[in-house]
Amino acid sequence: MHGLMMDYPLTIDRILEHANRIYGDRQIYTKLPNGSTHTYTYADLYRRAKRLASALSKRGIQIGDRLGTFGWNNYQHMELYYGIPGCGAVCHTLNIRLFAEQVAYIIEHAEDRIVFIDASLLKLFEPIAAQVSCVEQYVLYGVDSVPETTLPNVLLYEDLIAEGDDDYPWPVTDERTAMGMCYTSGTTGDPKGALYSHRSMYLHTIGMLQANAAAITSADMILPVVPQFHVMSWGIPFAAALAGAELIMPGPFLQPGPLADMVQDYKVTVVTGVPTIWMGVYQEVQKNPRDLSSIRALIVGGSAMPRSMIEAYEGKLGVNVVHAWGMTEMSPLGTICHLSRQHEGLSQSEQWDVKAKQGTPIGGIELRIVDGDGQELPWDGATMGELQVRGPWVIKQYFKREPSAESFTSDGWFRTGDVCTMTPDGYMQITDRTKDLIKSGGEWISSVDLENALIAHPLVREAAVIAIPDEKWSERPMAAVVPIEGQTGLNVDDLQAHLSAHFAKWMLPDKFVFITEVPKTSTGKFDKKVLRQQYTDGKLA
Ligand code: AMP
């Protein structure tokens, strides 16, 4: 017997309807490239997103068509997040930091019919456009007239919006309809497309809002530093609207100085970003102090937040750090770290140890760890295994690819490629990517543990550890270390002595190299593939 409750479709337009009705007067601020600030409300967003959806339908965009976006975090990109799915099409966010050939590959693979381009990125986009054939129309936003360009078929965004109707009825009734798409950053092989549905994104939004997750409310002012082209800005544009939180969109101003200013000027309560961003902001406020005390949650993920940075933010600046883990394939939020009642008696230092973990799965997500044969491993806080996940906002298949055994298990779990431990009370800690673990004489060494220890050294700014081939042990660790600017006193003996306090002798790196910067991917993660190519002659790349 079925229950007798409504089949209310979980579509993204419901979120915007709620925001308009209940929080219509709440502000969304955007930092514009000319330095001024654009201000409008959720009611304005609602009206313009509706007109956009209407105009796209009039121009023949069909349910399921993919439309690309190429832009910063701003109010127009918010409109695209709602207007494109609002007419049944798929909002396909393109990563502005990839090489032209990669973006062109992704556009062609997705068969984007329209691409919306932030005018400040037009020059960056032109070489991409030269390599694609599927796009019928380019729509430019952020300008009043079409500048000189090599792009064909250019339309102004404001002209498109003017074509739409205010009373357009949202057409999507099936919540399983695709609404958004994001390609993985592609450090291994070709980028792969994750295709989100209205239902999966709606449920992810509810998941984000849980008190044990991001706990966003109408009392918040959020600064989403995570780009809208990276996993839907971690879902903040939807979560903020459903909760009625105000937003300050940073546009192109992602440097530490302007970000610290925005926190201070807008009394920001929630920020999201990768560790590199927060390391930069920390160094900035050491030099030029700002008031960051309004932040109640500095949500950090994308790669591991070093414990030393958690200690710096909490101990020195009094800012609560919330460590989270997720993936493009998970919309992205999987786990988040909050202290629980059982941590009350712990010392501050022990609490920071807990906060350095990636935390517990949020309600809706299931985790398990398995060995090489797929056997489940114990949650004892020490046993490392491959992390597998399932839940209503986890991918079941990549776009235009059959589900492979490399990514999906036969019993319906997604293989994350991360290696972790689980404590008995459900706290997950990433120890590595499966491909980054170092196997020395049959024993595993975690590159992440070594990196965390190195970065805690007062003269170290960044450190990345990779495996180098070794005849006797098969692999040995090598550390690439970036000294803090102007510090010349750093040497290998010091670093070895520093690490010896935490690691067995056989785990210590055999080789240290000093570099000026760790190579990064388009989303700010360490690009160990590049390091491996450099230091192993491509043997372990
Ligand atoms: P992406 O799909 O680009 O967001 O990358 C997802 C991957 O980033 C995960 O599989 C992890 O390897 C890594 N990652 C994300 N968050 C964290 C975190 N808090 N700590 C360590 N690694 C993380």
Image (cartoon, rainbow, N blue to C red):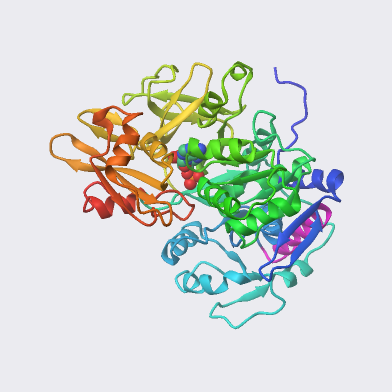
Across and down, in percent, residue 244 comes to: 79, 43
Q: Please name whichever residue, 398 or 526, is drawn nearer the observer in this view of the structure.
A: 526
Location of residue 165 by image quarter = bottom right
Furthest toward the front, the residue is: 489
The answer to whether residue 508 is visible is yes
Location of residue 54 by image quarter = bottom right
Across and down, in percent, residue 9 comes to: 72, 38
Q: Residue at x 71, y 57 (%)?
A: 79
The answer to whether residue 399 is visible is no
Q: Residue at x 73, y 67 (%)?
A: 36
Q: How many marks?
A: 0
Q: Is residue 128 magenta?
A: no
Across and down, in percent, residue 144 comes to: 72, 77
Indicate left or right for 190 with 128 as reference. left
Q: Is residue 43 magenta?
A: yes
Q: Please name whichever residue, 90 or 211, is drawn nearer the observer in this view of the structure.
A: 211
Q: Quadrant of the N terminus?
A: top right
Across and down, in percent, residue 177 comes to: 63, 45
The prevailing secondary structure element of the residues shown in magenta is helix
Indicate left or right for 540 with 85 as reference. left
Q: Residue at x 62, y 18 (%)?
A: 344
Which span of residues is magenta-colored? 42-60
Q: Residue at x 35, y 37 (%)?
A: 447
Q: Please name whichever residue, 330 or 420, is drawn nearer the observer in this view of the structure.
A: 420
Q: Does residue 250 lie above or below 370 as drawn? A: below
Furthest toward the bottom, the residue is: 148
